[in-house]
Amino acid sequence: MPAPVIAVDPLFVDAGDAERLVELAHRFGRYRIYGEAEHVDLDVGRGLLPRQDSVQHFLRTGGARGPGADPSTLAARTSYFREEYAYDGREQIGGVESFLHNPGLIEAAAALHDRPIVEPAIAFANLMVPGQELAVHTDVPEFRGASRKNVPEWLLVVMHHSGLFDAWRLPIATGISYFQDSDGGALRYWPDGPDADPVVLPTRANTGVVLDTDSVFHGVDPVALGTDAPKLAAGSTLAAEPDGRWALRRPDGELLGRYDWDELRFSVSWKAYCFADEAERDAWRDHSDDLTTDVIIERLVGDLVRRELTSPDVARDRDLGLLFIDTYVRYPAA
Ligand SMILES: [Fe+2]
């Protein structure tokens, strides 16, 4: 089933608003590697990585440059930097409001899911240095009663790909927006499903694109292809310096690289909940129809039993988590 992808061009009618967002990116200052925060673990899939599905696909395929690199090189290539500018509809840094409530993004989100009530929730920045890429994935979806606060990210992804929890899913629209023209770093996405050819969208300043990234596989091509990604350590940071350049440092302060703004790939992602009517929104707000982790696991096991892939008394352990991923999350072959 083809999924709509809606261009927002220009993103801001007044180009000065886009420039102010670049100023905000500098003012925010310091960016940490994404994925190093605490995460939820259950007996099912205990010890798996938050995005076990995406990581194992990336390690198997080698990403955009194909197989051959060792795991630490692969990890450095896809360890990009992320920070939140807004969360739960609230500013984390002054000046992000005009982006969070951008009329073009809101209009596109309503059209995407054919739902008129659009509640912008999150804005976060993604920064990548030359040599980095973003492994192919779908985003972490959300359901009534099940979010990354109480369910592992890989399990939320499994839930959506299984199609067994559609009645609880929160339709989320994602806007990806750009504020500079990048050397490489194009968005690669599969709007017609994992078996069809991908579409490649170069980044252009003051443009955006709105799509259902929970359903559409996507990744980012290497930035400055031909450059090796720096050897990152856990806890490395990318920070704006007083002279306007950017410094990449290990946690002990050792300098790994210095970059001009235009050498970096910068995007800001925007996520909004989309509701058909107030009853749908209220069911989400008042938790009157929430899933629990027990219901989630038993429903998935029941489906695997029907498919004759396991038995009802299968151990609720790490291997069951891997079986869920292998059964339901089908990545693009390319
Ligand atoms: Fe994504």
Image (spheres, rainbow, N blue to C red):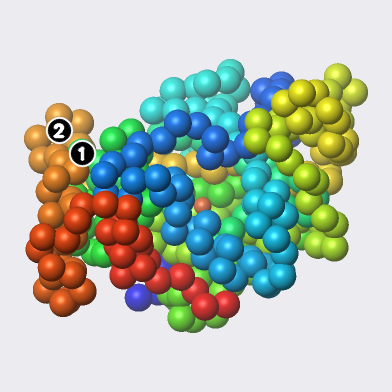
Residue at mark 1: C-beta within 8 A of ligand 1? no
Image coordinates for residue 107, horizontal then vertical, percent: 43, 48
| Residue 136 position (above or below residue 309) | above
Image quadrant assignment for residue 252? top right
Amino acid of disc 1: Gly
Residue 318: x, y in percent? 32, 53
Secondary element under disc 2, as helix, strand or loop, is: loop
Number of the label disc, if any, that sits on residue 287: 2
The alpha-carbon separation of the residues under discs 1 and 2 comes to 7 Å
Mark 2 nearby-residue class (10 Å; few <14, some 14–19, many ≥20): few
Label of residue 271 in the image: none
| Residue 256 left/right relative to 64 | right
Which of label 1 and label 2 is nearer to you? 1
**Which numbered marker is on residue 145?**
1
Contact between marks 1 and 2 (CB within 8 A): the answer is: yes
Asked whether, in this view, residue 140 is left or right of residue 92, the answer is left
Q: Residues within 10 Å of mark 1 (few under 14, many from 20)?
A: some
